[in-house]
Image (cartoon, rainbow, N blue to C red):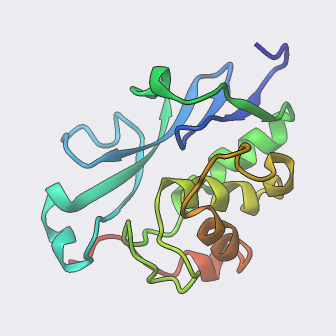
Amino acid sequence: MVPCRAWIGVSSNPSLRAQPSSTCIGFHSARGRMLYEQGVVVEAPVGCRVAGHFRIFQYEIRRWEGGTIPDLSSAVGSPVNVTSDAALVDRALAVVPFVPAATWGRDELHAGEMWNSNSVVAWILTQIGLIDAVGDPPHHGRAPGWVAGVAVGGRGLQESSAVSGVAS
């Protein structure tokens, strides 16, 4: 554990966790009805934007105070401490609602790679200027979608957030 007021950890399962306040940024299939209690700030389609009309074809991005990462125990490797700067942690939490609601598994943002949870983590880190602190995926590791997050995040907050949520 890092002895500090707050930190952002990036683990091999794509999620962010700000500690010690236990605010979790996670990615989940859209299922439940208690959206705001679980910190849902973005909803978007999976696979095909038109299919996003149905909840089974949606994913959620949560910024969840007191939240948990259900599959954290299955992560390959330990989290990487990216920063101990409380101001940067606050900035990371602040940009989460602006993550592009791109279709999961597609390249509709023309970044050269499909959008997924790795893209979201890379987008957030790019927005707050910490993408270089994380570096490349671990030796022999993979992070499909990472390049998309960096590319779209580098376009700036407003342009990269141009894709709105699920089609209505």
Left/right of residue 86 with respect to residue 97 in the rendered view: right
Left/right of residue 132 with respect to residue 149 in the rendered view: right
| Residue 39 against residue 4 in the figure, above or below | below
Q: Is residue 75 visible?
A: yes
Instruction: Identify the image quadrant of residue 33.
Output: top left
Which percent across, then down, holds residue 156?
Answer: 72, 76
Which percent across, then down, holds residue 46?
Answer: 29, 65
Which percent across, then down, holds residue 115?
Answer: 48, 68
Q: Is residue 67 visible?
A: no
Q: Camera-side residue: 92 or 72? A: 72
Q: Camera-side residue: 32 or 142? A: 142
Left/right of residue 53 with respect to residue 120 in the rendered view: left
Name the residue: 64% across, 22% down. 21
Which percent across, then down, holds residue 157?
Answer: 67, 73
Name the residue: 29% across, 43% down. 35
Left/right of residue 39 with respect to residue 10 in the rendered view: left
